[in-house]
Image: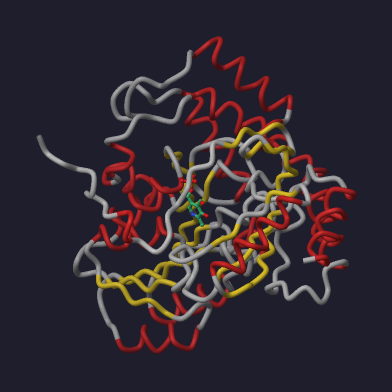
């Protein structure tokens, strides 16, 4: 008999991750029997439980069933995928769009398809794990630059010449809430003849008066050097991911992306929910509500040592793992679910609380959290 009990050597690790079976119910979340107000979701507009969104998904189950049954390249390529791709590309201002199973699949497949061992990838040090892994998987030479440091990036671009070079950055950074200067990255791309990949998973549906995200806000949608990636699993309240770019780029990706070709297509019911969520986002009220909530939170949290952020993500830097865990526990005792984020998700010594705001929060919910934060 093979003994696999120590395969992962988990007992020697300094910290263990725990999967807490937590049941969501609108704004609330039940964790280990305790009902808490949820400030830990990326459902920024509250659309995952919106009645119209859920009705659209249910109706699609009635007509299409649950799963899609095969990869898009076999028999899973429902016409709704194409309809959504056209609608989403038009809304975002790009020529073409490709829908994938998840953001993780999109980024891993995208960088693997775009790059090979002759390519150089220039990657912000705080980029999401999916971009880090995609770059690794591609076999490209990877240069990581200090977070948002365009001088270091430019020095790396000057030094490392190659026929194919890609600058890769999160748009809104998931654990910090700050944002890349997309215009500056495009300027560097023009000067040094590279392309740029922006992952605006956290900006789509939250940034800009229309929710079109950082790229839209910068007026760079459809730029020839730009590919935008993001997920449908955050502000769109659903699941899945998109890649936006020129028609030729998207067509090329369809031929080469292994995470498209060798993975089951996104279920139609999930997409139908996302389509309805997009309609609601286009109406604008949910984004206005989110922006009001962010404004209210910022006005009332001065002196709390929040990291600078104008987005829906508000980290409070605490330092050690213990400080972050204790603070999260105190908030739980006060009725709020705000997770402690620790290394390796964030750098050593930068453990933090990560608060995410939603349009679905009421003023009194946010007021209650602010009171508990001041009491910490
Ligand atoms: C910046 C960023 N990119 C990609 C992903 C992955 O997206 P998904 O959850 O759809 O796999 C996330 C999710 O946390 C993210 O924050």
Seen as rendered, the residue at the extreme top is 62
Q: Indicate the colouring scheme.
A: secondary structure
| Place of residue 310 in the rendered image (x, y in percent of width and height, measured from the top left) | 73, 67
- Residue at 81%, 55% (x, y): give it: 369
In the foreground, 163 or 29: 29
Give the image quarter of residue 182: bottom right
Can you say whether 144 is above or below 366 in the image?
below
Position of 275 with respect to 241 (left or right) is: right
Query: In which quadrant will I find the N terminus?
Result: top left
| Place of residue 28 in the rendered image (x, y in percent of width and height, measured from the top left) | 73, 38
In the foreground, 119 or 187: 119
- Residue at 39%, 64% (x, y): give it: 14
In the foreground, 289 or 300: 300
- Residue at 33%, 47% (x, y): give it: 253
Position of 116 with respect to 102 (left or right) is: left
Give the image quarter of residue 323: bottom right
Position of 361 with respect to 100 (left or right) is: right
- Residue at 37%, 74% (x, y): give it: 122
| Place of residue 191 in the rendered image (x, y in percent of width and height, measured from the top left) | 44, 82
Can you say whether 263 is above or below 64 in the image?
below
């Amino acid at each position: 008999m093979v003994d696999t009990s120590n395969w992962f050597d988990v007992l020697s690790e300094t910290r263990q991750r725990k999967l807490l079976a937590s049941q969501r119910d609108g704004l609330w979340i039940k964790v280990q029997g305790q009902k808490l107000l949820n400030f830990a979701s990326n459902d920024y507009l509250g659309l995952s439980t919106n009645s119209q969104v859920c009705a659209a998904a249910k109706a699609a189950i009635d007509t299409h069933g649950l799963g899609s049954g095969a990869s898009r390249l076999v028999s899973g390529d429902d016409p709704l995928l194409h309809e959504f791709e056209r609608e989403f590309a038009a809304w975002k201002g790009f020529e073409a769009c490709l829908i994938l199973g998840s953001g993780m699949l999109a980024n891993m497949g995208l960088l693997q398809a775009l790059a090979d061992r002759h390519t150089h990838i220039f990657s912000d040090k705080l980029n999401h794990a999916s971009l880090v892994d995609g770059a690794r998987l591609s076999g490209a030479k990877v240069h990581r630059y200090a977070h948002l440091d365009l001088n270091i990036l430019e020095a790396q671009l000057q030094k490392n010449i190659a026929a194919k070079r890609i600058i890769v950055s999160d748009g809104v950074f998931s654990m910090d809430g700050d944002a890349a200067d997309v215009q500056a990255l495009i300027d560097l791309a023009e000067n040094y003849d590279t392309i740029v990949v922006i992952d605006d998973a956290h900006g789509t549906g939250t940034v800009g008066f229309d929710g079109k995200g950082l790229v839209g806000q910068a007026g760079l949608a459809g730029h020839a050097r730009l590919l935008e990636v993001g997920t449908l699993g955050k502000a769109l309240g659903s699941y899945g991911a998109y890649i936006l770019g020129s028609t030729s780029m998207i067509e090329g990706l369809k031929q080469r992306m292994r995470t498209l070709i060798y993975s089951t297509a996104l279920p139609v019911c999930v997409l139908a929910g996302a389509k309805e969520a997009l309609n609601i986002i286009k109406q604008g009220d949910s984004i206005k509500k989110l922006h009001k909530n962010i404004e209210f939170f910022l006005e009332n949290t001065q002196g709390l040592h929040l990291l600078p952020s104008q987005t829906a993500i508000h980290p409070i830097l605490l330092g050690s793992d213990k400080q972050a865990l204790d603070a999260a526990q105190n908030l739980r005792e006060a009725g709020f679910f705000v997770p402690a984020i620790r290394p390796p998700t964030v750098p050593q010594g930068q453990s933090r609380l990560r608060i995410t705001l939603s349009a679905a929060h009421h003023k009194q919910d946010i007021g209650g959290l602010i009171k508990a934060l001041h009491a910490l």
